[in-house]
Amino acid sequence: MSNQMLNISMITREALRILENSLTFAKGVNRDYDDQFAISGAKIGDTLNVRKPARYVVREGRVINIQNHVETSVPLVLNQQIGVDVQFTSKDMALSLDDFSDRVLKPAVATIANKIDFDGLSQYVHVPNFVGVPGTTPTALKTYLQAGAALDNETTPRDGMRRVVINPAANVEIVDALKGLFHSGERIKGQFEKGLMAKEVAGFDWYMDQNIVSHTVGPLGGTPLVDGSGQTGSEIDLKDWTAAAANRLKAGDIITFAGVYAVNPQSRQSTGQLRQFTVTEDADSDVSGKVTVKISPAIVTSGAFQNVTAAPQDGAEVRTFGEVSSLANKVSPVNLAYHRDAFVLGCADLPLPGGVDKAARVSDKQLGLSIRMIRDYDINNDNWHCRLDILYGWKTVYPELACRVMG
């Protein structure tokens, strides 16, 4: 019996299914979906505001202490429209859906999925916590346990939604390191048969992703110190860098200040670990070796959002990735340990245009994804020209719920 001629709705729905199955990092994050973008005349802009819960300070004693209810929000900008453009013949359209999927759709959609994952993994620059040593691939489970401890110190839930995503080199090292600790069984047989880490090890589900992004540490230089006591907020003045040099610190570098310790976000008690800050913009030193560095999180020394034991003191030592200058220009893959809610992938419906042969859009609110296909016919060559499009944006909503594992 001949195959049923494929229609654009069938193809678009299959494309969405392939996209969901091809995602690695993006599959394990919070995903938001908004269909308002496809409504003609809605004019809602390109930004969704993701609301974050309020925080409070516990009162001690009988006397009332009224606190303001302050909710914060972070903007999620849907600013990435990507796609793949393909063509196929009328003969291709006569194939079965499975054949058409294998030959035409899977290669095209895999390209889209890899781009979405790469953009998501590039969110590492907003994550201030790290373990490991830049330029050195982790070879022991202890490094990942330290990442888990970093999440614990930030009161990250242990609710089965923690993941580790690592690059191929890190996967090789950790599988080899643990090969003598496991016996054959249904849960972990893939570790031996497929060469991949088993799921549910050390409090994480494990995944390998070739899209892991590499970070290049800044040139550093000098013996940097804090320039002035009592500084709070998202900028800090530093001194004693190499003078008049560009990009002493690069966006994504992580710095610490001597004597400035992280606190538990609920009890505000010191964790005993230096608070780590990510540099949000490249920073140049002036002719006297001074630098004003933009950092995240902002330094907060009191109140419901307190995150450090104290502001840095004048002359406090500054270290980058735990070192002074020995990691200058080091290139390091950035593997990630994270809770699902650390990152949000937002997706929205693209409008369906007129004046074309066919246009279809398939959305799934549960998956948080939407993909559109537009088809037009080339009468001269008997080809169908098609474009696949997706509109999305990434946001690090809770950076404290993630930890870099440097490689």
Image (spheres, rainbow, N blue to C red):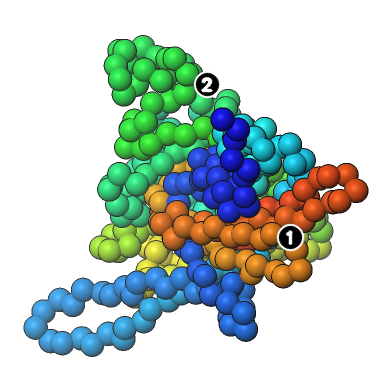
Which residue is the site of mark 1?
A: 357
Can you say whether 393 is above or below 17 in the image?
below
Q: Quadrant of the N terminus?
A: top right
Query: Which residue is most to the left?
Result: 62
Query: Label 1 to label 2, Cα distance in Å?
Result: 49 Å
Q: Which sits in the foreground, 22 or 54?
A: 22
Q: Residue at x 36, y 41 (%)?
A: 148
- Report x, y in % for residue 81: 68, 60
The residue labelled by disc 2 is 172
The three-letter code of the residue at mark 1 reads Asp
Question: Residue 334 vs residue 398: left or right?
Answer: right
Residue 128 location, x and y as percent?
A: 51, 53
Q: Residue drawn 42% across and 20% down?
A: 191
Give SS at disc 1. Answer: loop
Any part of residue 5 in sight = yes
Can you give x and y, in whole percent of width and height, for residue 304 in the image?
A: 33, 73
Task: Give the quadrant of the C terminus.
Answer: top right
Residue 253 visible? The answer is no
- Is 399 on the left-hand or right-hand side of 292? left
Kind of residue indicated by mark 2: Val
Residue at 58% across, 77% down: 39
Q: Quadrant of residue 300?
A: bottom left
Category of crowding for the residue at label 2, using alpha-carbon neighbours closer than 10 angstroms: few (below 14), some (14–19), many (at least 20):
some
Q: Tag on residue 265?
A: none
Q: Is residue 239 left or right of residue 139?
A: right
Q: Please tell me in which quadrant of the rendered image residue 137 appears.
A: top right
Location of residue 179 in the rendering, given as x and y in whole percent from the top left corner? 40, 14
Residue at 75 percent of width and 63 percent of height: 356
